[in-house]
Amino acid sequence: MKHTGLWRFGAFLKGVLSASGKAVAGLFYPRVCCVCGEGLVRGEEYMCTACLADFPFADEDFGWQPEMGSCWDSACRPEKLYALYYYNKFSPYKNLIYQIKYDSHKMLGRYLGRMLGQKIRGKCTADCIVPVPLHPKREKARGFNQAREIACGLADVLEIPVYDDVIGRIQNNASQTGKNASERLKNVANIFELRQPQKIRGRHVLLVDDVITTGATVGACLRVLSGAGKVRFSLGCLAQTL
Ligand SMILES: [Zn+2]
C-alpha cells in the first residue's frame, strides 16, 4: 500500500496530461461537428448526434459493375467494393472528406476508417489492407497519407495487417479534376511501382482510398499490385461517386 500515494500522483499527472492534450487538440480542432459545424456536447465525437443519426450510409456493398470496365483490367477485378457513405456536392457530408484532405484532420480519417470497419465486419474476407500511396512530396506537405489513416482505422476493427510498403508512388501526377476518362487513364499510367510483392502473393487484399471517383487511380494501383501473383482484391473507400 506504500505505493498508493505515488500511484495517485501518477493518475493525477496522466489526467492532467490527457486534459491538456485534448485542450491543445481543441485549439486546432475546436469541438464542433465536422458535418454541420454546431458545437459538440459531452460524449459526441467528430459528429453531432443529429448528423450521426442522418448519416447517409451506403446501403449495399456491391460487386463488379460494367461501368468500371474502362478503368480496371479484367485480370484484377475487385470482388467487392465497400463504401461507407454516399454524398454529392450539395451534401454537408462532403465536409468530412474535405477536412481530412485539406484541413489535415488526420484523426477524422482514422475515425471514419473505424466506422467503415464496423460496417463491413463479418462481410469482408480480405486478409490484409493496402492503402493507395501518396507521392512522398504530397504526403510531406499534408503530413500524412489519408488512405493510410483510413486503413489503420479499418485494421483496428477487422484485426488484419496494413501493408503500406507493398506499393510506392513514383510520380506525383497532376490532379484528375477536370480531365475526361481517357485523360485520367493517361494521367495515372506508370505512377506506381511494386516493392514488396511477397507480402501479398496469394492473399486477398483490401485496397483502400478515401474517395473513388472514376476509378482510374485505383485501377492503376490494382494493375501493379496484381503483378505480385495470385492476388484477390476488394476495395474500401469512405465515399464513392462512380
Ligand atoms: Zn452536426
Image: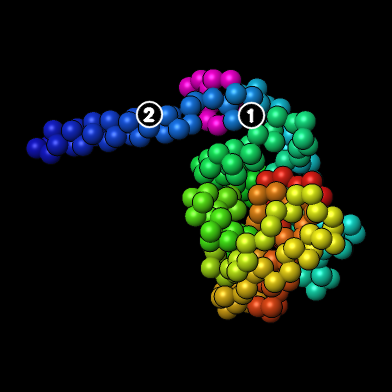
Please identify the quarter of the rendering in which residue 193 is found. Answer: bottom right
The residue that disc 2 covers is 23
Magenta highlight: main SS? loop
Colour mapping used in the image:
rainbow
Residue type at numbered disc 1 = Val
Q: As rendered, which of 229 and 107 lies closer to the eye? A: 107
**Element assignment for label 1:** loop
Does 80 appear above or below 89?
below
Q: Is residue 126 visible?
A: no
Q: As rendered, which of 211 and 112 lies closer to the eye? A: 211
**Element assignment for label 2:** helix
Q: Which residues are magenta?
A: 38-48
Residue density around tag 2, few if under 14, some if 14–19, many if 20 or more, within 10 Å: some
Q: Is residue 219 magenta?
A: no
- Please provide percent x and percent y for residue 230: 70, 77
The reply to whether the residue tagged 1 has its Cβ within 8 angstroms of ligand 1 is: yes
- Please provide percent x and percent y for residue 241: 79, 46
Q: CA distance from mark 1 to mark 2?
A: 21 Å
Q: Residue furthest left?
A: 2
Please identify the quarter of the rendering in which residue 59 is found. Answer: top right
Q: Is residue 45 magenta?
A: yes
Please tell me which residue is depicted at 67% across the width and 61% down the height of the picture.
173
**Which of the two discs, 1 and 2, labels the residue nearer the N terminus?**
2
